[in-house]
Amino acid sequence: MSQSEAGPTAGDSTSPPTPASEDTTPASSDPKAALAARMARFKTLQAQKETGRKATEKEVRDAEDRTARLTQISKLQDVHDKAAYKLLKSEDPEFERKRNWDYTVEESESWDKRMAKKARSRDNVAFADYTKEANKVYKRQIKQMSKVDLDNYAAQKAEKLQRQVQSGILQLIESPNGDLYTVNPLNQQINTPAEEGYSHDHTPSKEAIDKLVEDLEKGERARLKARAAKGIRDEQDVGDVTYINQKNKQFNDKLTRFYNKYTTEIRENFERGTAI
């Protein structure tokens, strides 16, 4: 029997297709299946978002509760300490003296000085005279000296020393150790600029001008605040003085507000001298 009669061999390319190869389209190409998969993914993301939101809200509530509890505990501790202090002070007449045993003599003296200084400052708030007021302003400005730019001051001093050495006003001396310093031949001052006539050519920086303006405005605000506390209006309150104090002025303003429309003609007649 010939090969053609025996049928196709395993290697023959003309063999008929198998039934399994008839449908080669993947299942994911189905629109309904793809939509269902996307909806499932969307619901999963929504569930994760809701879970994260609830977890965040819980953490925020826990933090707020923790802060409130700590604040409450702190207040209760303060109340407890004050109550314990009052109880011990009432039971033991020498409580204050015994409590001072925990401090050294230097600490006690420093505390007494601090309290005395605080009492003097509290009593010295009211205006006494212009000399004391200027002294208070001077002390306040001295306390603000820590805000001075020391680097800029040192740079300006070095520049002035160098200029005076170049002009012959100061002498530049070198020590045996190799250090350089300036000496004023008139008074033998070391590293100190000599006195010069003011040439009126100094231009302050913008920061210095702003600081000066801020100090002036601060003093003006303090002055207006003190005047308002005393019941004194600003200088803008001009016009006829028809009152003897601020209470009387307030009463006159109230009368004017309610009865001015009835008394305007009478007052004008009095001013013209035509009143009957």
Image (tube, rainbow, N blue to C red):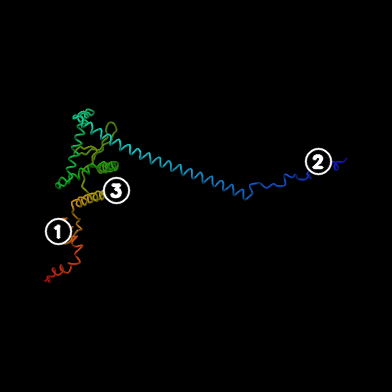
Q: Nearer the viewer, residue 170 or 85?
A: 85
Q: Which mark is residue 243?
A: 1
Based on the displayed image, in which of its 4 quarters is residue 144 positioned? top left
Q: Going from the N terminus, do you reach mark 1 or mark 2 first?
A: 2
Based on the displayed image, in which of its 4 quarters is residue 56 positioned? top left
The image shows residue 108 at horizontal and vertical percentages of: 20, 31
The kind of secondary structure element at disc 2 is loop
The image shows residue 197 at horizontal and vertical percentages of: 20, 47
Q: Nearer the viewer, mark 1 or mark 2?
A: 1
Based on the displayed image, in which of its 4 quarters is residue 167 positioned? top left
The image shows residue 67 at horizontal and vertical percentages of: 36, 40
Q: Amino acid at mark 1?
A: Tyr
Q: Going from the N terminus, do you reach mark 1 or mark 3 first?
A: 3
Q: Which residue is mark 2?
A: 9
Q: Going from the N terminus, do you reach mark 2 or mark 3 first?
A: 2
Q: Which residue is mark 3?
A: 207
Give the left or right position of residue 9, taking residue 112 as reference: right
Measure how far apart labels 1 and 2 are at the Cα level: 132 Å
Dots 2, 3 in contact, CB < 8 A: no
Q: Nearer the viewer, mark 2 or mark 3?
A: 2
Query: Which residue is at a point 25% across and 34% down the rendered structure image?
Result: 83
Q: Amino acid at mark 3?
A: Glu
Instruction: Specify few, some or many for label 3: CA neighbours under 10 Å numbering under 14, 14-19, or 20 or more.
Output: few
The kind of secondary structure element at disc 1 is loop
Q: Residue furthest right?
A: 1
Q: Nearer the viewer, residue 117 or 157?
A: 117
